[in-house]
Image (cartoon, rainbow, N blue to C red):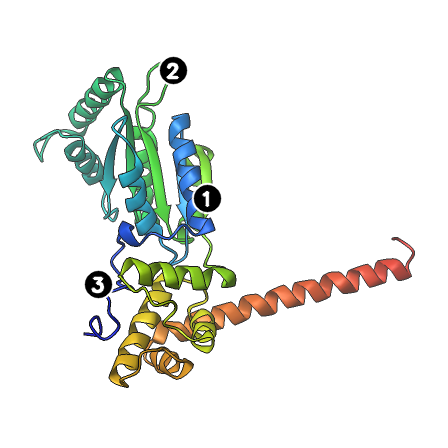
Amino acid sequence: MYLEHFKLSKQPFSLTPNTEFYCELATHQEALNVLLLGLQQGEGFIKIIGEVGTGKTLLCRLLLNTLDDRFVTTYIPNPDQSGESLRLSLAIELGLNPEKNLPQHELLEAINSRLLDLHRAGKKTVLIIDEAQALPDSCLEAIRLLTNLETEEKKLLQVVLFGQPELDSKLKQTMLRQLKQRITFSYTLKPLAKDELDAYLCHRLSKAGYTYGSVFTPGAKRRLYLASAGLPRLLNILSHKALLVTYGRGLRVVDSKAVKRAIADTESAHTAKHRLNSNLILALVSSLALTMVLIIYRKLGLL
């Protein structure tokens, strides 16, 4: 609706995880480096944790696009299934065509045989699971057992888990301790830092064809950051709505008033802002507590 008004070739803040709009934020680049290093090592599980809206799915797609032909990737975007159905999904992803009623031990033998063939061809097979916090415990155990498939020297299957913080809580269960011990590399995605906001907005706009500098005023950017708490998805939602408001007002620059109206129309913005304020308060309280402890120690002559 507003593309021609702002001289854009495409929507700059679409919610679809499009790798064309990937911005090399520090946290995403660090996570990608951990993934590539872990896969090169060839053993164990790799776990990427991130809050809702931090860009896990985009990172997942970027990884799939980055891996070269030395890797065979199997991708499961819908993990809410049983261990049996997950093995069937893996077999299909590996290019097998198993019968739906094939006994599980025969299905496992077929998967093992296919993994061995790929290993002999010099390929590394990677199972990538998005939204892994939704995996039932039985399914996680089934995945762990799949990683028991190995030669004398190497694992035949590596697993990458992308999930929300609830995945960490799930893995603390005693029954899943064996799987947790096999996680050799992990990383937690962080929201955008305040000084990354301008680069992120300009990057998205330039990829959409905007060549006239920044369309957001400093006041608008301050409101955007506070309301989004640095979460890319929420930042995209608010930026898109602010552009709509600005277009409706017949203006060319997004001001703080437009962002304010976008925030009022976005329920999750209030939650994010509350979370950011809570984190700031917690950090302040912790700092004050540490200061008080140091003062007491000095008075007691312990420092």
Residue 172 on image: x %, y %: 47, 45
Which circle, 2 or 1, is nearer the viewer? 1
Residue highlighted by disc 1: 30
> Relative to 104, does residue 174 appear above or below in the rendering?
below
Q: Secondary structure at mark 1?
A: helix
Rounded to the nearest angstrom, the CA distance separating label 3 from label 1 is 28 Å
Residue highlighted by disc 3: 10
Amino acid at dot 3: Lys
> Relative to 66, does residue 303 appear above or below in the rendering?
below
Q: Quadrant of residue 61?
A: top left
Q: Quadrant of residue 35?
A: top left
Rounded to the nearest angstrom, the CA distance separating label 2 from label 3 is 49 Å
Q: Secondary structure at mark 3?
A: loop
Residue highlighted by disc 2: 153
Residue 66 seen in this snapshot: yes
Residue 17 on image: x %, y %: 27, 54
Amino acid at dot 1: Glu
Local packing at callout 1 (Cα closer than 10 Å; few below 14, some 14-19, many 20+) is: some
Give the residue at x 50% y 68%.
276
Rounded to the nearest angstrom, the CA distance separating label 2 from label 1 is 29 Å
Local packing at callout 2 (Cα closer than 10 Å; few below 14, some 14-19, many 20+) is: few
Pick whichever, 227 or 68, lies toward us.
68
